[in-house]
Image (tube, coloured by chain):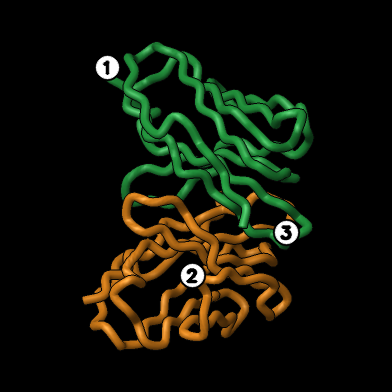
Amino acid sequence: GQQLNQSPQSMFIQEGEDVSMNCTSSSIFNTWLWYKQEPGEGPVLLIALYKAGELTSNGRLTAQFGITRKDSFLNISASIPSDVGIYFCAGQLWASGSRLTFGEGTQLTVNP
Amino acid sequence: EPEVTQTPSHQVTQMGQEVILRCVPISNHLYFYWYRQILGQKVEFLVSFYNNEISEKSEIFDDQFSVERPDGSNFTLKIRSTKLEDSAMYFCASSDRGSQPQHFGDGTRLSIL
């Protein structure tokens, strides 16, 4: 099956710093999504991307759908303590049904 | 905001027993999914369900697993004879179309003893 490589695996930053994480795949996706998961909860949708090259923002979050359809990045600007959590990228290929393929996750720790 | 709800939040079961995990998807959604997440690992797809039938399943979803939409609101995952390696968080998700984002519940933690 398709594999997503997400990096970095973990990040330890100071409050106010900007953060960047990315996902790459050996094959294309039609949709890229970014989710955040906090302890004891399910993944919460942050941003959905549908077109190659698309750049979308949600508050301090910005994500882009790579031109090749094989990668995506998520940036968080001016991080705050409540940004702590695990961030997952997920790809969806409509031709193979609607399943989401998830990355391994980026554990973000923000020090006040 | 509408949300996906799952019950129970935690299920402890003896190995070999049957377990049913329950989900109430968002009311106007037509596509339903189950995923699992073993502790410390990524989320893995199990099965998708549309129009009262399975539309896709992964290699994890073997003969021990089944899904059902018994009425207009519930969506269930049954594991017939649980194994130790079935211990995981199980997430239900739904979307209004197959190409639209999936929204997840908070999961059921399944512990097999």
- Of the residues tagged 3 and 2, which is closer to the observer? 3
Mark 2 highlights which residue? Answer: B23
- Residue type at numbered disc 1: Pro
Dot 1: within a 10 Å radius of its alpha carbon, few (fewer than 14), some, or many (20 or more) residues? few
In this view, A99 is above or below B19: above
Chain letter belonging to callout 1: A
- Quarter of the image for the C terminus of chain B: give it: bottom left
- Of the residues tagged 1 and 2, which is closer to the observer? 1
CA distance separating discs 3 and 2: 18 Å
| Residue at far front of view | A26
The orange one among the chains is B
Dot 3: within a 10 Å radius of its alpha carbon, few (fewer than 14), some, or many (20 or more) residues? some
- Measured from the top left, where is residue A22 in percent x and y? 55, 30
CA distance separating discs 3 and 1: 40 Å
- Measured from the top left, where is residue A73 in percent x and y? 59, 28
- Secondary-structure class at tag 2: strand
Tell me the tag on residue A112. 1
Dot placed on the residue nearer the N-terminal end, 3 or 2: 2
Q: Is residue A90 left or right of residue A106?
A: right
In terms of image quadrants, where is residue A98?
Answer: bottom right
What residue is at 41 percent from the left and 56 percent from the top?
B106
Most foreground residue, B59 or B113: B59
Chain letter belonging to callout 2: B
Q: Colour of chain A?
A: green
| Residue at far left of view | B113
What residue is at 54 percent from the left and 76 percent from the top?
B74
Residue at mark 3 shares a chain with residue at mark 2: yes
Mark 3 highlights which residue? Answer: B98
- Secondary-structure class at tag 1: loop
